[in-house]
Amino acid sequence: MRVLDLSFHEPAVNLALDEVLLDSAERGRAGECLRFWECPVPFVVLGVSQKVQEEVCEDACQRDGVPILRRCSAGGCVLQGPGSLNFSLVLSYERGPALRNIRESYCYILCRIRERLATRGVRASLEGIADLAVDGRKVSGNAQKRRKSFVLHHGTVLYRVDALAMGRYLKEPRDRPAYRGNRPHESFVSVLPLGSDELRRAVREAFDAPEVTVEPLPDELAEARMLAQEKYLNPAWTLRR
């Protein structure tokens, strides 16, 4: 498994590189991968099937210069930025039969992370389809994009959060897990009591990933920048629903 720890200032390039890493594995150019990234600027990102007008406070985003983007994976609309550590896993279905089933794959991945958090004194639970929660409050959201031989798993672990900003830029979702109830963002989302370096170690341990990080292939980086321009910054993609 390759391990990348690479963040870009441009939100679109961060999203594009994840898709390129999945493409690389599917095309046989590279194999499994774990990438960590944390965008230094805030942005709103929609799940692949969501509608902007239903999920985003567009006027507030425009007023404050907060970009609105759409990722390639499913899941809900979230506010990204400092304090949100992302782990992007590209895993082969050959790793285990559970990965071929959507619900079982979330359990396979998140149970491993939960176990590593437990060794650090954090008792997290699996909630909904794809959340980790502590004391009933969400600390990690997850989503996937699937191809023939590999799955891209997007996960975010929160160690710092601006709950008021969430309420300013995100509408209250219509589709919500039962454990959320009617709680607004600021009383539903929480943070893990671990720093970003310790969270990186926990995720690495969960998948026996090496400590040594590598750079993306030169072609991957070039493709990510091109994909960011052609797709992720294209209003036809962002506003397609």
Image (spheres, rainbow, N blue to C red):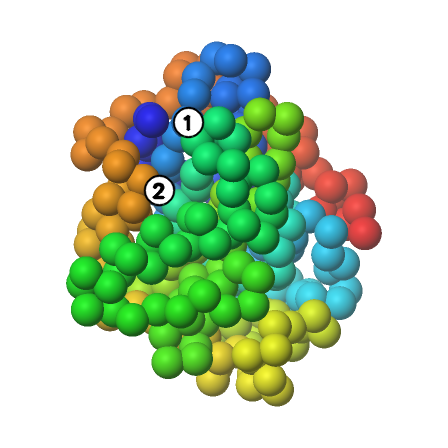
Mark pair 1, 2: CA separation = 14 Å
Residue 6 in sight here: no
Please state if 233 lies on the left or on the right of 189 as rendered: right
Indicate whether 83 appears above or below 179: above
Mark 2, other Cα within 10 Å: few <14 / some 14–19 / many ≥20: many
Mark 1, other Cα within 10 Å: few <14 / some 14–19 / many ≥20: many
- Residue found farthest to the right: 241
Q: Nearer the viewer, residue 21 or 177?
A: 177
Please state if 216 lies on the left or on the right of 236 as rendered: left
Indicate whether 68 appears above or below 60: above
Q: Are marks 1 and 2 in contact (CB under 8 Å)?
A: no
Residue 114, located in which quarter of the rendered image? bottom left
Q: Nearer the viewer, residue 23 or 220?
A: 23
Give coordinates of residue 19: x percent, y percent: 55, 32
Residue 152, which numbered label? none
Is disc 2 placed on a helix, strand or loop? strand
Please state if 81 lies on the left or on the right of 120 as rendered: right
Give coordinates of residue 152: x percent, y percent: 53, 37
Q: Residue at x 47, y 39 (%)?
A: 14
Q: Quadrant of the N terminus?
A: top left
Please state if 142 lies on the left or on the right of 172 as rendered: left
Q: Nearer the viewer, residue 84 or 40?
A: 84
Please tell me whether mark 1 or mark 2 is closer to you in this view.
1
Give coordinates of residue 20: x percent, y percent: 53, 27
Q: What residue is shown with label 1?
A: 32
Q: Nearer the viewer, residue 171 or 104?
A: 104
- What's the residue type where badge 2 is placed? Phe
- What's the residue type where badge 1 is placed? Glu
Is disc 1 placed on a helix, strand or loop? loop
Q: Residue at x 37, y 35 (%)?
A: 34
Give coordinates of residue 108: x percent, y percent: 44, 48
Residue 36, which numbered label? 2
